Image (cartoon, rainbow, N blue to C red):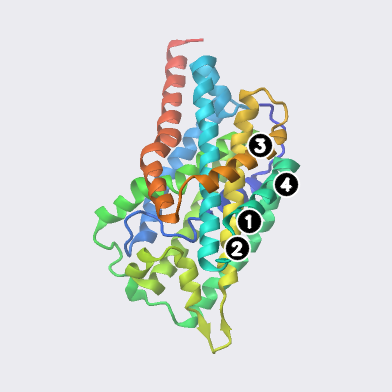
Amino acid sequence: MLNKSVISPNQLLAMIILFEFGTALVIPIGGQTNQGIWLSIWAALPGGLLIYLMFDYLLRQYPNMIPSEYMAVLLGRYLAWPISLLYMLHFLYIASRNLREAGDLLIASSYDQTPTLVIHLAMIVAAVYVLQKGVEVFFRLAQIYLIIMICAGGLGNLVILFSGQIDPANLQPITGEGWRTVLGAAYPFILMFPFAEIAAFSTVLPRLNQVRMARKTGILAMVLSAVGLSLTHAVEMSVLGSDLYSRSTFPLFTTIGLVEIADFLQRLDALVLLTLIIGVFFKMSMYIYSAMATAAYLFRIEDERRLAYSAGITVLFMSILMAPNFLEHKEEGRTHLTLVLPIYMVVIPALLILLHLLRRRFGFK
């Protein structure tokens, strides 16, 4: 892939934050829910940073190359091609999961009379339209919507604070049932979702106009994401308590639904729905772009924008057909998170780095 130098560090920062928020901002995370969930987020952050640094290291060793390209260098074309194909399918699968989660949550909260297909179609049409305009337009858009999300989140947190619903006792004891529970939620659950998903950016980092800024920008973005996620989940836990938080499908929506100030400021559900739609749109679209970039290399297509329609249609149908209901969707996601994601996000990049070091040590061509 040629480095077209179209993305700035600030745009990358905004996109990573929106991507990490995704659905992680509005649904329960961590698998083992307890009062220390916000602490589990911070415990998982170092692991997420390590994964990002692995891909940054590979980028520095193979400038202007996406993973499919340096896999071909390290593994040879015949082994790298099927692995890259699996990565492409993985990106499409995760994008379809994001779309399915957004549709189910929107229907469960406010749009129960709207067919699932209509909601999914509206979101995928918007994603395809933006991706057809190119990655530069997509990342510029992230800067605008990050400001909108910060404003919506700030307003929501202020309203909750002044509503008197926050009960600090719900956060006690801080470590829940102990540090073992905190770390059990962090690894592998929060590490894999959302932090390890940063691997999707490996397909776009070569387009950064200051590649040397990729490391600092990514680290800063992930730390800021951890701040937002830990604050949001701490607020949810302090309002709902661990029992209601764990039983709620959409705890942020439940939390904001309890807000009522002076009998006139209430029903602020729109803030949560806006946050959900923005987060899912950018996360889903980023995964679709990663699949497009990988497919463009595999099938020798010069401009990945030509793949936007086919990728969008694939994600749309996968989102409808993947699971009969939300409970099965969650169970399938849990299995994927613990068994499949670590292979793509940790094992393969670690093996690539090891192979690169061996090649350099022994001078293999």
Q: Provide the secondary structure element on which disc 2 rests.
A: loop
Q: Provide the secondary structure element on which disc 1 rests.
A: helix
Foreground mark, 2 or 4, reads 2
Q: Label 3 belongs to which residue?
A: 310
Q: Quadrant of residue 288?
A: top right
Question: Quick one: label 1 or label 4, which is nearer the N terminus?
Answer: 1
- Please rate how many residues cluster around mark 4, counting C-alpha atoms within 10 Å: few if below 14, some from 14 to 19, many from 20: some
Q: Quadrant of residue 165?
A: bottom left
Q: Is residue 103 above or below residue 216?
A: below
Residue 235 rendering spot, x and y as whole percentages: 44, 69
Question: Quick one: label 1 or label 3, which is nearer the N terminus?
Answer: 1
Q: Amino acid at mark 2?
A: Thr
Q: Label 1 belongs to which residue?
A: 118
Residue furthest to the bottom: 262
C-alpha distance separating marks 3 and 4? 12 Å
Q: Amino acid at mark 3?
A: Ser
Name the disc covering residue 114, or none: 2
Q: Label 4 belongs to which residue?
A: 129
